[in-house]
Amino acid sequence: MKIAVMGAGAVGCYYGGMLARAGHEVTLVARAHHAEAINASGLLLETQAFTERVRVAASTDASAADGAQWVLFCVKSTGTESAGRALAPHLAEGAVVLSLQNGVDNAERLQATIGHPVIPAVVYVATEMAGPGHVRHHGRGELVIAPSPASADIAATLGSAGVPVQVSDNVASALWAKLVLNCAYNALSAITRLPYGEIMNSPGLAVPQVMQDIVHECQQVAQASGIALPADTLDAVLHLAATMPAQMSSTAQDLARGKRSEIDHLNGFIVRRGEALGIATPVNRLLHTLVRLLEKNLPTVQGGAA
């Protein structure tokens, strides 16, 4: 199968690499330094189970998606529309497009931009780009996707490549639950420059209470938005660090590389939605403001890989 990964950062390289390793024809649309390294030496895929170089094509141009049967759209939330416009002229009529992005509204925004159906997916994987063309996997890797005519085939194909996939009628709730996880960890990891395990392993500090306050605000906003979050949302947040203790948040990774983050679509989204609904979100507002202050002197980067 011919597959294109649009915005091949840590998430896109991991899933694209797993599919290429399973024998699919994969092209990664990535930043120049990653594309050059991948074309020269292959993608270095370092997982918890194996480390190997995977032969895969790479490009910096959306035209590489020409003829792809699947497109995994892994672009940062800040670049959804601009990357979607670049992709649209190269999208095959019957292509399957999956949004593997943070936030709760990217699939809707992308579908409006490209005029083509988009399947939303919830991504549970801890990865980082450890160097040019080198993706490091810290834990998990499963996907939850919405029902569609292609979803059963997607689940089977990805499952054969070592990626567990669940097809769910309630992806909206799952996306919001993932948003809550991101709101709880991303900003704290970026501000402190600590991985998840060190954040939670802080005796004498009220980290669990801070997490509870973040989650409570998100739950209020979700409920007012008509979203029923799982009953164990707080427990899932508090226990996430144990499943990926070495993970630095994507927000922390972005700031470390001098890039603008997705914080406007994470804690910032909760703040804006809360304002619209008349719900106070002081903890999320503080975290959003602190990350934006850290970004203040960074150059604005359009698009980017998720």
Image: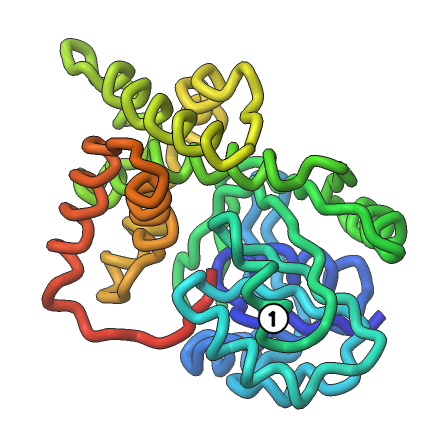
Residue occupying the far top of the picture: 204
Q: Which residue is mark 1?
A: 112
Residue at (60%, 44%) from the top-left corner? Answer: 122
Residue 1 is situated, as x and y percent measured from the top left of the image, at 85, 70
Which of the two residues, 178 or 243, is positioned nearer the viewer here?
178
Residue 105 vertical placement versus 37 (above, below): above
- Left or right? Give the position of 282 relative to 222: left
- Left or right? Give the position of 288 relative to 109: left
Residue 155 is situated, as x and y percent measured from the top left of the image, at 82, 47
Which of the two residues, 71 or 280, is positioned nearer the viewer here?
280
Observer able to see residue 80: yes
Q: Three-letter amino acid code at disc 1?
A: Ala
Observer able to see residue 186: no
Residue at (80%, 45%) from the top-left corner? Answer: 159
Residue at (46%, 74%) from the top-left corner? Answer: 34
Which of the two residues, 303 or 22, is positioned nearer the viewer here?
303
The image quadrant that residue 211 belongs to is top left
- Left or right? Give the position of 278 relative to 104: left
Q: How many marks?
A: 1
Residue at (49%, 69%) from the top-left corner? Answer: 80
Residue 110 is situated, as x and y percent measured from the top left of the image, at 58, 68
SS category of the residue bearing label 1: helix
Which of the two residues, 53 or 106, is positioned nearer the viewer here?
106
Residue 282 vertical placement versus 51 (above, below): above
Residue 82 is situated, as x and y percent measured from the top left of the image, at 47, 79
Other residues around mark 1 within 10 Å, as few (<14) / some (14–19) / many (≥20): some
The structure's colour scheme is rainbow
- Left or right? Give the position of 48 relative to 249: right
